[in-house]
């Protein structure tokens, strides 16, 4: 059996703005570094509260 495929995603949910948004990153470190910048900009642009979380998933190769 082959190696799994790793994905790192940031889940963003803007209150009062509908469903979630996802952004993909090459590593957990990149996601964590980008998280406060992205949250701050979403808040400034929309005025809404933003919930976020960086997650790592290992998926089957196919």
Image (cartoon, rainbow, N blue to C red):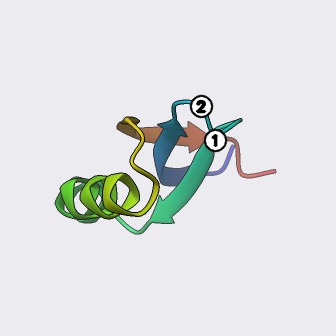
Quadrant of the image containing the N terminus: top right
Q: Which residue has dot 2 on it?
A: 16
Tell whether 31 sits left or right of 45: left
Q: Is mark 1 on a helix, strand or loop?
A: strand
Q: Which residue has dot 1 on it?
A: 59
Q: Quadrant of residue 44?
A: bottom left
Tell whether 16 sits left or right of 38: right
Calculate the distance from the C-alpha at mark 2 to the C-alpha at mark 1: 31 Å
Could you say which is closer to the camera, residue 41 or residue 35? Answer: 41
Q: Residue at image x 72%, y 51%?
A: 61
Task: Using a 10 Å C-alpha cutoff, classify the residue at mark 1 as few (fewer than 14 neighbours), some (14 to 19) or many (20 or more).
Answer: few
Q: Is mark 2 on a helix, strand or loop?
A: loop
Whether residue 6 is situated above or below residue 25 in the rendered picture: above
Q: Where is residue 54 drawn, in percent x and y?
A: 36, 42
In the rendered image, is residue 58 in sight? yes
Tell whether 41 sits left or right of 17: left
Q: Residue at image x 51%, y 52%?
A: 6
Q: Residue furthest right?
A: 62
Tell whether 27 sits left or right of 8: left
Q: Are marks 2 and 1 in contact (CB under 8 Å)?
A: no
Could you say which is closer to the camera, residue 41 or residue 25? Answer: 41
Query: Which label lies toward us, 2 or 1?
Result: 2
Task: Using a 10 Å C-alpha cutoff, classify the residue at mark 2 as few (fewer than 14 neighbours), some (14 to 19) or many (20 or more).
Answer: few
Whether residue 34 is situated above or below residue 56 in the rendered picture: below
């Amino acid at each position: 059996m082959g190696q799994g495929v790793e994905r790192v995603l940031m889940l963003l949910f803007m209150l009062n703005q509908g469903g979630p948004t996802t952004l993909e990153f090459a590593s957990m470190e990149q996601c964590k570094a980008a998280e406060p910048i992205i949250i701050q900009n979403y808040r400034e642009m929309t005025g809404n509260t933003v919930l976020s979380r960086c997650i790592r998933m290992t998926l089957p190769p196919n």
